[in-house]
Image (cartoon, helix red, strand yellow):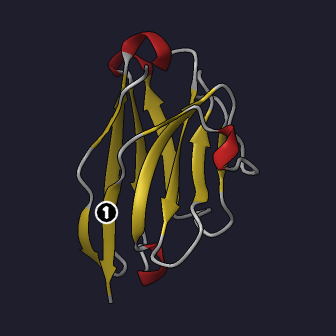
Amino acid sequence: QVRLVESEGGTVQAGGSLRLSCMASTRYFSVSAMGWFRQAPGKEREFVAAVSESGDRTYYADSVKGRFTIFRDNAKSTAYLQMNSLAAEDTAVYYCVAATHLSESSSRDDVDFWGPGTQVTVSS
């Protein structure tokens, strides 16, 4: 079983920034793609961003391109999601995920492991 531990989210004003981190079980982390999904109230859980196991390829949902950046530090078994220019529509529970492969077309079915989720609230 792989354990994913996310950092706490928080509340930020519109236009602000927030960084999420996700630490994974060491043995699995280096051979898996990592990513983030999110789920807003009353909406489906959706793909946000992903990074390949080596960190050389990244994928983003159109709604976050140019604002969010995903990267990883394999030495620390940690993936990060830097979120800038946050808007009210970014308010959601954010889930760290791990999988054999992730891309911008990934769905929930492609995910092998989920973190417990962390709340991000953007106030206008």
Where residue 51 appears, x then y in whole percent? 59, 36
Where residue 102 appears, x then y in whole percent? 68, 37
Residue farthest right in this picture: 105
Q: In this view of the protein, can residue 83 be seen by the observer? A: no
Q: Given the image, on which type of amino acid does mark 1 rest?
A: Gln
Q: Secondary structure at mark 1?
A: strand
- Closer to us: 36 or 81: 36
Assess disc 1: are there few (<14), some (14-19) or many (≥20) residues with their C-alpha within 10 Å of its C-alpha. some
**In the rendered image, the vertical position of residue 8 relative to residue 33, given as above or below:** below
Q: Is residue 95 toward the left or the right of residue 105 in the image?
A: left
Where residue 96 appears, x then y in whole percent? 44, 43
**In the rendered image, the vertical position of residue 86 relative to residue 18, given as above or below:** below
- Closer to us: 101 or 56: 101
**Residue at x 71% of width, y 47% of height:** 106
Instruction: Give the quadrant of the N terminus.
Output: top left
**In the rendered image, the vertical position of residue 105 relative to residue 112, given as above or below:** below
Q: Is residue 46 toward the left or the right of residue 90 in the image?
A: right
**Residue at x 35% of width, y 45% of height:** 116
Residue farthest bottom in this picture: 124
Q: In this view of the protein, can residue 99 be seen by the observer? A: yes
Q: Which residue is label 1 attached to?
A: 119
**Residue at x 33% of width, y 90% of height:** 124
